[in-house]
Image (tube, rainbow, N blue to C red):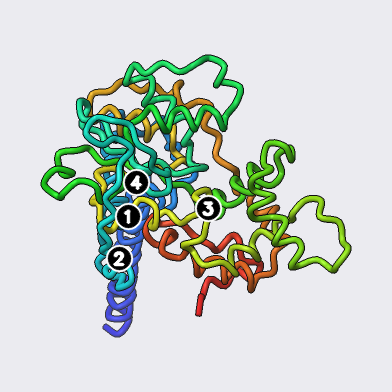
Amino acid sequence: MDVVCRKCSRHRILIVTSLAGVFLCLTLINSLDRWAAQNSTVRLPKQVNDPSFDRSTQTPEDMKRRWEAEYESRVQRVRGVCDKDEIVAMRRIWRVATNRRFGKETYCKTKLCPVIVDEQKVLFFCFVPKVASTSIKKFFLNISNIPLNDTLKDNITAFHIAANAALRRVSPMYFPTTTVNRFYKIMFVRHPFDRLVSAFRSKAEAPREEVAYFYDRYWYPVMKKLRPEGSPLDQITFSEFVWYLTHTVERDYDEHWAPYWSRCDPCLVDYTFIGKLETAKHDFPYAFGKVEIESSPEWWSDVHPTQHSVALKYFSTVPEEEIRRLYAIYKLDFELFGYSIREFLPSGNITIN
């Protein structure tokens, strides 16, 4: 009898062990299935540097939905940051300016009038220097059938002067809310530090005769202040440029490095679309397509944003403490548009006091 009981007990143990093994296997398989399902979903990152998806597994409709979700998240992010920022909430200054009054031309600096408006196409576009502003102005001249002298093609400064005069421009706060809400409102940005490097390369490293104004107005005074007396005042360095930025009040900045928030007032103007230069070939056609204006990716093929690797090389010459001071100046731009400073900090510690 004892032998029979022992055999039955062993069988029960084997059965229970087998069932437990099967249960564990099923649980493991189920967990692996859920993990695979979660990781098969392609998500656009908060900071879009390369929007290339695995097109082999994404249908056109999937792609469209993901892009639209990304664009909506950009707009919602700006609104959320603006609601929390007390400094921006206090920036309710009515700056009413335009380069057209009663149908007549008048002068208005682009720093004060950075918004191109097209009443017929219901477009309101805040352009930012060093964020494809040349391509944007050429595009608006083209869709508005405004011809410019061909000789301007080889003189970028003369082109901008002529384009600024030919296009209707206003301040962000020019229209009352009821009027501005009729427009499809667009602004484009890029990584704030990439833009600074682009501005430095354009306005400090270009041939001296092309940037004489910037040397007379900014760079010579900086070099005289920072270099020992009698030192050559040849070419300003990037670290000296950063020193200038961290020791100058924002209101005195040139428009080529003025923060986005101070130029386009995204917390006072509820922009419909926030584009990024990192995804220019997709963002520009999509934005203009919303108002039924054809804008093929080829039109924006000459838009080449500064690579992070290039910007990182320039910032490697700057002490981390100075980078943190610079970030404090542009912090709102980083937060509004979802960019990161991590890759620019040697320590990798993004905690900012």
Nearer mark to the viewer, of 4 and 3: 3
Q: Nearer the viewer, residue 11 or 66?
A: 66
Which residue, given by chain and number where applicable, does mark 4 sit on?
41
Labels 3 & 1 near each other (Cβ < 8 A): no
Residues at marks 4 and 2, CA–CA distance in whole angstroms = 41 Å
Q: Residue 236: percent from the left, percent from the top?
A: 74, 54
The part of the image, by quadrant, that contains residue 246 is bottom right
Residues at marks 1 and 4, CA–CA distance in whole angstroms = 35 Å
Nearer mark to the viewer, of 4 and 2: 2
Name the secondary structure under disc 3. loop
Q: Residue 130: percent from the left, percent from the top?
A: 52, 42
Residues at marks 4 and 3, CA–CA distance in whole angstroms = 43 Å
In-image side of 279 versus 315 (left or right): left
Residue farthest along the left direction in this orientation: 178
Q: Quadrant of the N terminus?
A: bottom left
Residue type, mark 3 in image: Asp
In-image side of 352 versus 10 (left or right): right
For the residue carrying disc 3, how many other residues have a C-alpha within 10 Å: few (<14), some (14-19), or many (20+)? few
Name the secondary structure under disc 1. loop
Which residue, given by chain and number where applicable, does mark 3 sit on?
254
